[in-house]
Amino acid sequence: MSSVISLTDIGRVFIMGDQQFEALKGVSFDVSAGEFVAIMGASGSGKSTCMNILGCLDRPTDGSYLLDGLDVGGMSTNQLADIRNNKLGFVFQGFNLLARTAAIENVELPLVYAGLHAKERRKKAITAMEQVGLAGKESNHSSQLSGGQQQRVAIARALVNNPAVILADEPTGNLDSSTSEEIMGLFTNLNKQGITIIMVTHEHDVAAHAGRQITFKDGKIISDNQTSRTCQTGLTD
Amino acid sequence: MDFLQTLKIALRALRTNKMRSFLTMLGIIIGIAAVIAMMAVGSGASYVISKQIASIGSNIILVLPGSTTSGGLRSGSGGAQTLTSDDVKAIMAECPSVDKAAPTVRSSGLIVFGNMNWSTVLMGTTPELFDIREWGVVSGRSISQQDVDSAAKVCLLGQTVAENLFGSSDPIGKIVRIKKVPFTVVGVLDRKGQSPQGQDQDDTVFVPLRTAQRNLTRSQLPNSVGAVMVKAKSEELLTKAEEEINSLLKQRHRINGGKEPDFSTRNLSEILAVAEQSSKAMSLLLGAVASISLIVGGIGIMNIMLVSVTERTREIGIRMAIGAKKNDILLQFMTEAVLLTLLGGLIGIILGVGGATVVSNLLGWPTMISVQSIALAVVFSAAVGIFFGFYPAKKAAGLNPIDALRYE
């Protein structure tokens, strides 16, 4: 099975004045195509740092990171921006949509930076909106959408460039439980279509939707559980 | 990312805060409007001056008789009758840098035709004057050398005089009475307009020099003349001609050592050049004041752009996470700043042109709006945008996406 993500001995040291803080200590794991992984852990456990590195927003101080077969470690800032644009899709806790901007334009945004033409952008964005069940809401501004709908727009935005991995950082953190269920249902659905998802969460019932739970503590992985359910789906897909 | 998209994003950002965008632009608007209006008024003024220079004729030196002292009162230059027709002939003959010289005698009086009369300036002169001043006739003929030699009782009317005495009828060949002496009108001069001193140059009647000396001025010295107009052979020879005239006349009038000369020379083009220069200096000064307002406006734009960058830190973070490069962010904020200044510049140009038009209509000041000044305004406002937009844009582009995303 091909690895979409391969982390080997990743370390991340923050230097604040004369103090050093090791946020990650020799973290290694692989994620295969079509997996749905939940990264868990208490705050300060290093899961966010790991997520930033996975998202190419931060660079590890140690170890190597292969994303879709590419060594991301030695890349320049601009190259990393391209990687984020082509290979990754982000879903954030706070939705992070552009205010006063139509939903469809938010979804189109990654394609704008990819340099696609307006027609092609619109076509792809409409498809992504349909995928997340928001057909017909294209011209609504984010303020006219509910929290769940906003998160769907964000997911559509993450999907639109056909990424290798979708990274979701506490995607249900700002949502009530029934909406959380909806969003997790959507993620599960997308995963069934073969999309690789890595999600950071500290809620066990949310993490239960994932086929694999990696738990961090003090910058190290303390457990890596593979539940049979998604593993099977991953295999059958 | 294509530029059209960047432009769209910038336009949207400006539209989002319409009032703020407008207030930010205000500095640039005022600055550009002021620069345009100042340049229009300034170039209008120098246009008028250069027209006046052309109306006098080029390369002209004025030789004035000296002052007279009677009973302790000095009369000022031109008061004494120290210059003669012979002096003029000598200037023409002996000064190599002099092209032509024309004596004038000046008087004023009533000119009558039928039941119409008009008080005007009477000027006796020789045909050279009209060459020197490049002043032609619109109808009839000018004064000839023969008229001067024979002291013919003929006259040449300025436009204002012709209009006031004859209205629309043709004055050529008519007999008018100047100071009760009958004269035949031989021609009407072209319109010359105002002199640099604001006098109507067309309100003059010209007669042959000798006729004036005999019949109009009735001076005790029949050969004396008033101001003499001299034309130098070229602009370069102007100063040289002035020196030649000075030394010639000193010699002729036997003025040596520290004795004060009984005549004076004035270089008219020089006086006007000074006037033009001072008007240019004035508009330059006003322009400098206006540019200060542009700089202040630019600082205002930088200030607002910095606020905007802080306000939109999260947006910048989102854009970066999604794949915007540093240059995309830099360009976005630069475009916004330049758009602000360019828009302000355009509004300023409209206001400046409008203001200049209002000034010229209401106050009667001449204004000239040049294409260069508008082009300069556009370039300058764009430059202000680039200069003052760069720092905030650089700051935006330098943000760390992780911190930017977490920014509240």
Image (spheres, rainbow, N blue to C red):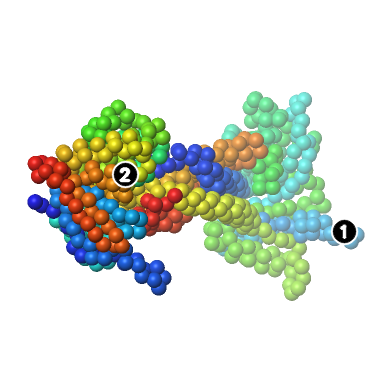
**Element marked by disc 1:** strand
Question: Is any part of residue B17 visible from this angle?
Answer: yes
Residue at 26% x, 65% y: name it: A25
Which residue is rendered at x = 74% and y = 45% of the image? B212
Q: Residue furthest bottom?
A: B257
For disc 2, the neighbor class at 10 Å (few under 14, some 14 to 19, many from 20) is many
Point out which mark residue A171 bears.
2
Q: Position of residue B382 (x, y in %)?
A: 44, 49
Residue at the location (76% across, 68% down)? Answer: B260
Residue A39 pos. (x, y %): 26, 52
Which amino acid does the dot numbered 2 rest on?
Pro
| Percent position of residue A175, x then y | 36, 39
Label 1 lies in what chain?
B
Considering the numbered disc 2 on the image, is that residue within a helix, a strand or a loop? loop
The front one of A60 and A110 is A60
What is the x, y in percent for residue B23? 54, 43
Q: Residues within 10 Å of mark 1 (few under 14, many from 20)?
A: few
Host chain of mark 2: A
Determine whether, in the image, residue A104 is placed left or right of residue B235: left
Q: Quadrant of residue A50?
A: bottom left
Which is more foreground, mark 2 or mark 1?
2
At a point 59% along the width and 65% down the height, the residue shown is: B240
Residue B85 vertical position relative to residue B359 in the rendered view, above or below: below
Depth order, front residue of B144/B332: B332
Q: The residue under label 1 is which amino acid type?
A: Leu
Measured Cα–Cα span from mark 2 to mark 1: 104 Å
The residue tagged 1 is B73
Towards the viewer: B80 or A237? A237
Q: Is residue B136 left or right of residue A190?
A: right
Taking the image as shown, residue B108 lies to the left or right of residue A205, namely right
